[in-house]
Amino acid sequence: CFSERNMPASFSWKDLDVEWEKVERVSTLVEAALDSRREDAETLAKARRLEHFYPFLVRWNVEDDGSATTGQLVKLLRLTQLVMEAKQLSNEDNLDRVIEEETSELKEKISCLQSELREANESLESEHERKGVGEAVERLHAQVERLQRQVATA
């Protein structure tokens, strides 16, 4: 059960009559796409375009007044099933595209960060080497001073 708190922002009004002639017009394609020609690329491509029926399906008002035949209702149900699957396929395609774009961007960022890390490591190594040379020079100066003092006292 839904509480008011977790309901969608708004459902569409069911304010349009079902356009049975549209349902009838696409029923052959719907049946081919859902049954006999479901693997056929051309049929699949045409059937996926039936996604444009979605705005109608969510607004069509089906009354329980006996005006629609069982056959019409079955065709409407099959169209609804196909449109739902087409929407799902479109959503999956969009998700795949977004994932691909995000992955590409992340790979680029990782590459930049790896490059920055290499540069930082090289800089640290260079600084460490300079410190090592500087410390060695200081030790040599100290030895020279010590030797000069020894020579002076000798």
Image: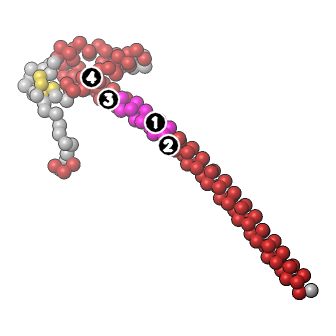
Point 40% across, 30% down: residue: 93
SS assignment for the magenta stretch, majority: helix
Residue at image mark 2: 106
Q: Amino acid at mark 2?
A: Leu
- Which quarter of the figure is the C terminus placed in? bottom right
Mark 3–mark 1 distance (CA, rounded to whole Å): 21 Å
Q: Does the residue at mark 2 contact the one at mark 4 (Cβ under 8 Å)?
A: no
Residue under circle 4?
Answer: 52
Q: Which residue is mark 1?
A: 101
Q: Say which element carries label 3.
A: helix
Is residue 103 inside the magenta stretch? yes
Percent coordinates x, y for residue 45 in the rendering:
38, 18
Residue 108 placement, left or right of 27: right
Tag 3–tag 1 contact (CB < 8 Å): no
* Circle 1: residue type: Glu
- Residue 11 location (% of width, % of height): 17, 37
Q: CA distance from mark 2 to mark 4?
A: 34 Å
- Are the two marked residues, 1 and 2, in contact with CB atoms closer than 8 angstroms? no
Q: Which mark is residue 87?
A: 3
Horizontal and vertical percent for residue 59?
16, 28
